[in-house]
Image (spheres, coloured by chain):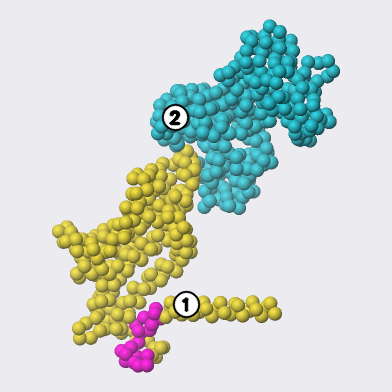
Amino acid sequence: MADLQLVNIDKHYGAVHAVRDVSLKVESGAFVVLVGPSGCGKSTLLRAIAGLEDITSGDIIIDGRNVTRLAPRARNVAMVFQSYALYPYLTVFENIAFGLRARGETEAAIRDRVNWAADTLSITDYLNRHPRELSGGQRQRVAIGRAIVREADVYLFDEPLSNLDAKLRDGMREELKRLHARLGRTFVYVTHDQVEAMTLADRIILLRDGVIEQDGTPLDLFERPETRFVAGFLGSPPMNMLDVTVEQADGIVRLEDGQMLPTDGLGIPKETGHYTWGIRPEQMRLAQKGEPHIKVAVDVVQPTGSKLLATTIAGRQKLTVELDAHSGVDAGQTITLAVSTTRTVFFDSDGRRV
Amino acid sequence: MRRWENGWRLALRLVLALVAVGFFAFPIYWLAAISIKSPEEIFAYPPVWIPSGINLSGYVALFRNGDVWAVWNSLVTASVSTVLAMILGTLAAYGIVRYRPGGENLTIWIISQRMIPPICVAFPIFLLFVSLGLVDTFVGLIVLYTAFNLPYVIWMMRGYIQDIPPELEQSALVDGLSRWAVITKVVIPMARGGFFATAVFTFIFAWNDFLFALVLTRSEVVTYPVQVTGYFGSQSTFWSQIGAMSMLGVLPMMLVVATMQRFIVRGMSMGAVKG
């Protein structure tokens, strides 16, 4: 168990600047998720930590040891790959034992550790099989087994669930979280899936174009996104972004189509001007009589069982609202929505939260 | 009705298969027959299809006058050069695939070396070998066969190594192996089928070489194809010895191919589609 520090990491691929001056510190035992759209540099960063990718400049420090120039095997990290990276010619037992053998462990120690890992991941029954005889989910467990069987300082996961179907993914997510709690080791996890990031992480590092866009707890990023990009990336369905004018003196938010929403002045920007108002679908509800509201036309409704997702139109802008499943709202109706400004966010023209 | 149809179809297939096997196996049978026929039977007309007895005089002569060493010489030169070409070629192919020196063109250039008609380089190589004192030595033939087979090995192994997902190697590197260990513990086991298939073909090329063996050997390391030609005299031709020596030359090949058949078939189809 160890902490991990990245200091001013830079990575160029020819003319492409993949990672730009990234610095961060991961505490021992943390579950950190690097998330972002494809090409944001998250996998490059993870591979750099593993030593599979040379960095252009900067330092990687694991447990106080500068490992920047060390070969992967000298860094004492373990990694789970997206494609599982299992050896087809070895049994599950030998696949899991591979890293221990490479490090010259004794036969007895190997047996103990492999059995422990297999037991932890409930794959004891498959130890004598070959990877081709396993399902996707079982292969994924073996891949995780290969990593956790070693006493590594840091465990790296490169989109390990992306090859699984949705149902299996949910199950594995839960297991990974349980595994982390049980092992208490340092996990660094890369994904492009915001649900995985939200559900797994103690801390999310959201990357964009090789730069850390925001770094914080999942709730921090979800409720207090520092930029419009972060707000749009996390949450499903995504946050609504409305172009509005705020009149600070009167506490009024004016929509693009001229509708005016009076507020109590809390949570709105301190200066009058044009802003983007970020409202999560679940932050709106049908307005009661006499309550301040905005009027929207319902375009499409999508019942999810527990909720009703309504895509509505306010002027020329689209607004997705999450309503009660029994609200009775249907396409073609005009409805009134109440929204409190205290938990919604406003972004300036540069996309930064105000 | 159906069953009859299936029966006929099966029978037809079997007959066709037998005809094909007969077509390809007959020359070998004929060779084997010559090697044990008496001189009268060899020249008899109409031909004697099945030898009346087993006449081993051809074989006895080979062992008595020591000509059988030619098979040993072939075995040594072909085996050692195959091992060397496989080691060097696999390492080169690995380097080409993973580090891409010279881009695409390097591989094309390497395989182009294989396209040179051997006769074009036979004379310069002879002169070179004379000056290096390598004519009629094991080292000379082994070096030549290794060099001659390298392009083929590199080309084939490149295809097989390209099929190995890089994550398998990366995973092994993170797990604690060095680059060298990755080659022996991951790359070669992963490309095992192709590796053996390539080795078999490399061995066959060296084993069957006639031209260089003829030009570069005199008396010390005469290989079996050259030895066979020694029985064609101006006065008479020793057919039973030709038959016997040829059989000794064919047998090791048949053994190699029979034991490696599994790899060869898979290796050929694998290599063929991935260039």
Q: In terms of secondary structure, where does tag 1 sit?
A: helix
Amino acid on which disc 2 is placed: His
Is B12 on the left or on the right of B189, as rendered? Answer: right
Local packing at callout 2 (Cα closer than 10 Å; few below 14, some 14-19, many 20+) is some
Q: Nearer the viewer, residue A240 or A115?
A: A240
The residue range painted magenta reads B27-47
Coordinates of residue A20 in the picture (x, y in percent): 46, 25
Q: Is residue A245 above or below residue B162?
A: above
Q: Are marks 1 and 2 in contact (CB under 8 Å)?
A: no
Q: Is residue B213 visible?
A: yes
Q: How many marks?
A: 2
Q: Is residue A234 above or below residue A147?
A: above
| Residue at the image position 47 percent from the left and 51 percent from the top | B163
Q: Is residue A66 visible?
A: no
Q: Is residue B177 magenta?
A: no
Coordinates of residue A109 in the picture (x, y in percent): 53, 41
Q: Nearer the viewer, residue B5 or B77?
A: B5
**Residue B133 lies in quadrant:** bottom left
Is B75 on the left or on the right of A342, as rendered? Answer: left
The residue that disc 1 covers is B21
Q: Which chain is cyan?
A: A
Q: Chain of mark 1?
A: B
Coordinates of residue B248 in the picture (x, y in percent): 34, 75
Coordinates of residue A307 in the picture (x, y in percent): 78, 31
Local packing at callout 1 (Cα closer than 10 Å; few below 14, some 14-19, many 20+) is few
Which colour represents chain B?
yellow
Q: Nearer the viewer, residue A150 or A39?
A: A39
Q: Chain of mark 2?
A: A
